[in-house]
Image (cartoon, rainbow, N blue to C red):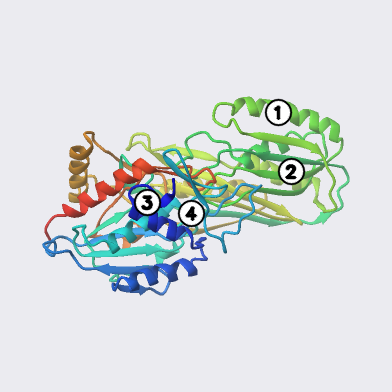
Amino acid sequence: MALSNIEPQIIWKNFSKLNAVPRPSKKEEKVIAFIKGFGEDLGLETTVDEVGNVIIKKPATAGMENKKSIVLQSHLDMVCQKNNDVNFDFETEGIKMEIDGDWVKAKGTTLGADNGLGVATIMSILESSDIPHPALEALLTIDEETGMTGAIGLKPGQLTGEILLNLDTEEDDEIDIGCAGGVDVTITQNYAVEAPKGQVVRIEVKGLQGGHSGMDIHKGFGNANIILGRLLYTGLAKQNLEVISIDGGGLRNAIPREGVAIIAVRNAHEFIAEATNLKKEILEEFASVEPGLQINIENSTSSDKAISEADSKKVILTLKALHNGVYRMSPDVANLVEASNNVARVELKGGELKILNLTRSSVDSSKYSTAEQLKSVAELAGMNIVFSGSYPGWKPKPGSEIVQIMEKIYTEKFNEKPHVVACHAGLECGIIGANYPEMEMVSFGPTIRGAHSPDEKANIPSTQKFWSFLKDILANIPQK
């Protein structure tokens, strides 16, 4: 079945159009032009602000003029991840999609349903002629995935809406009313290099699930960088280990799926034997949650230089000591991760080390406590550390009028109560709310699995449910 034939056809049509346009984070020029043209072709007031956010305004339909005005909000950029065996250029190619049962997925890459389905839904509302709604402002932001610079660049007074509906949640039975803030924690150091003295060994970790570094951080998935650190640690005691290179992970908001380390050791045979014993333990440890995990440890060659044994020890001990995963569960909201860290990217080449972490928390003090623990480890190892890209969380307001309306509609429509939750991810609502403190906000969306990884997929029946729910919400917005 073709994507254009599944319901709701209008959303999948627009999602297909959107996914034909490259839209990596920080390289959104093509999709900005696409969305701007879309709004202008509909004859709607369309503007692009100085940072690249697109705002499209649509008047209320007949009889809805006195209802509270609505901001429909999603982000234009997508996480660009692919499997190593896939040849794909996210800057020039459109996403190649396919249907697998009740799911839409991509062929070896991220799908971009996060947050492309939200964008496609907003496009569908904007071009509709038969859906009742109040006055609308579509806010389509840039760079949500790598810095929130679109939301950060939004200024007071650009929006006039009274209620913001963010369409960036990934469980269709959830109504999100709060989220985590975050901060990037980057560790760097430059080391002298020399020709390695020992025998070269290559260690590869691959086949992990990966996933969203906020929403999936509590699920016990393996982190390729942490597993590499454990394997390297086995050679410290008696192998005169020198690190030649490390290349692990990718994006700051994705749990690392793959990583490779090239090292030199005194006796490769002994090291491989010892590391293989640990490999067996790790595979058994992750057997239930990471059935695809593969670890390869083998003799190799390299013409590259290595950092010294002493510096190698500092790097490996740092990797071993960095906190990864859940730091604290919320004492106030059941089953909510309050604070966490993702050791997202480790790169060492030619003596230049860079370790990128994304620390999240719904409580600012807890966020910085976690980040300062990372800083302490790095400083003990004589490394440099920088905090950057900090953004606030979104404090829940469970009794707001729009939340009550949505709960009532959902319960009557689907014969069950929705889960009103806060999420451990960086929704833009917290940043937008700082400039629009009187605006009511809520986030919801269709079910998406595996966001930020090539396993990402969007559920077709859930998208139908979400579309029906949204239309009913727009028809039942309260009076001003």
Front position among marks 1 and 2: 1
- Residue at 52%, 43% (x, y): give it: 455
Residue hosting label 3: 168
C-alpha distance separating marks 4 and 2: 27 Å
Callout 2: SS: helix
Q: Are marks 2 and 3 in contact (CB under 8 Å)?
A: no
- The answer to whether residue 214 is visible is no
Residue hosting label 1: 278
Quadrant of the rendering where the N terminus is positioned? top left
Residue flagged by tag 1: what amino acid is it?
A: Leu
Residue flagged by tag 2: what amino acid is it?
A: Lys
Residue hosting label 2: 313
Callout 1: SS: helix
C-alpha distance separating marks 1 and 2: 19 Å
Quadrant of the rendering where the C terminus is positioned? bottom left
- Residue at 21%, 57% (x, y): give it: 131
Label 4 or label 1, whichever comes before in sequence order: 4
